[in-house]
Image (tube, rainbow, N blue to C red):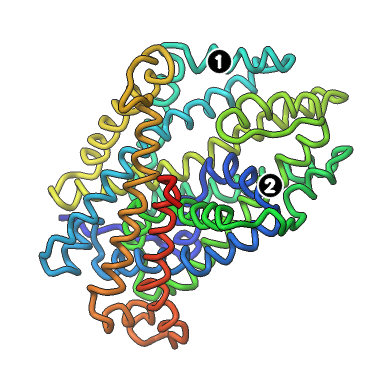
Amino acid sequence: MKERGNFGSKLGIVLATAGSAVGLGNVWRFPYTAGENGGAAFILIYIGCILLLGIPGMVSEFIVGRHAQANAAKAYDVLSNGRPWKFVGYLGILTSTIILGFYAVVAGWCLQYLYASIAGQISGDAEYVKSYFVAFSSDPWKPTLWGVAFILITHLVIVRGVQKGIERASKLLMPILFILLLILVVASCLLPGAVEGIKFLLHPDFSKLSSSVLLEALGQAFFSLSLGTACLCTYASYFSKDTNLLRSAGQIAIIDTLIAILSGLMIFPAAFSVGVNPDSGPSLIFITLPNVFQQAFAAIPSVGYVISIMFYALLVFAALTSTISMHEITTAFFTEEFNMPRKKSAWIETVVTMLLCIFCSLSVGAWADLKVMGLSLMDFCDHLTANYLLPLGAMLACLFVGWYIPKQVVRSEFTNNGQLKGYLFEFYLFAVRVVCPIGISLIFLHQLGIV
């Protein structure tokens, strides 16, 4: 078999792995959740959850991937000496494939809205914008074709390999994403009345804090960093042996959190400026925000036009960095486990996820009667992965690293075989053995409505 690819630089490691974490959830979930749950008070709790749960969880998956230098399934197999822990890797591969299938549907919506923005097709009053989205999302083929197109774009990156494909794309997409976001934040914050939106997001309201808010922050930290998908494990298998795992995890968490907060500073000032109370979820970015941009920049329509294009370009880039990472998980698996050429492995994942994307897309449109346990196929896949597969995968990864792998092996990876001091190793080990399992259990129970 050909020698495995590796990231060529430390910058490539950070940008590619941060790109896997940065996604549409940073734009449509975090800002609304923070604003509704105490603003800056929620953000402080969220940062605490990142430190106690997110970073230790990331480091654990990094340790498994880098030590084994193999795909997720093989990595767990190597470290467990053939014991059944290999199924944790399979679980991550399955989870990422399902997520890519339905995530591509929404990513395709973003791609279509980018095209529609350029063509000037979504300008009009609020009712027109709403009817446009309803008509598009219920169309039997348009959303499906855009979703398939997004997977094919992802495929084009993956087949080029780790350095020429994933790393090169990440070095291009992440800086552009950040620049676009900064421009949109400045434009939004300069609008009349924008200060109220800034206060909504950043003013600490400790009266709203409760156990439920704590669990929301815990869940947001968990899902935002892509824990439980095997993505971090797969990417870490391309890390060099001198990569500082703890520092890399910290840098990635900072980038992810910063982009989430900036997304709020892009959305809320503009919304409050025109007196619109922003919703969450798809309605925010496909119904509410197009109307907000038009109203906010009504005096200079050309500016509103450019802002709309930049916003949907931002969403497309954010989605693409995530779909690339999810695709790579299974591509690496087939390449290494079955000794397949990379292109053939990538096509297997592409075809499987395209089929899932087609059925998920049709289940919320032309085939609305296609239900699984009372949910559309798309909502069922979302529910299955978010409530069961992701927490289970992350829990097993932490238990595996914290309690099964010999402590000296974990320490060796944490300290780069003694090259780093490792002052925080004991704290990390306590977090991954005790704090993370408890935190993930609470997230799991909260998602199920038990606590």
Figure quadrant of the N terminus = bottom left
Q: Earlier in the sequence, mark 1 or mark 2?
A: 2
Task: Please tell me whether residue 117 is drawn above or below residue 127 in the rendered image.
Answer: below
Residue at image point 45% right, 19% down: 143
Residue at image point 61% right, 46% down: 33
Task: Please tell me whether residue 128 is drawn above or below residue 97 in the rendered image.
Answer: above
Disc 2 residue type? Gly
Query: Which residue is more in the foreground, 319 or 431?
Result: 431
User: Does residue 167 show up?
Assistant: no
Q: Which residue is mark 1?
A: 134
Task: Please tell me whether residue 96 is drawn above or below residue 227 in the rendered image.
Answer: above
Residue at image point 31% right, 73% down: 402
Residues at marks 1 and 2 touching, judged by CB atoms closer than 8 Å: no
Query: Which residue is more in the foreground, 275 or 447?
Result: 447
Instruction: Report, in whole angstroms, how far the alpha carbon at label 1 lies from the one at label 2.
Output: 27 Å
Residue at image point 22% right, 59% down: 3
x and y percentages locating residue 319 in the rendered image = 49, 39
Tell which residue pokes out farthest to the left in this image.
Answer: 82
x and y percentages locating residue 345 in the rendered image = 22, 41
Q: Which residue is mark 2?
A: 35
Query: Which residue is more in the foreground, 97 or 274?
Result: 274
x and y percentages locating residue 109 in the rendered image = 51, 26
x and y percentages locating residue 119 in the rendered image = 64, 17
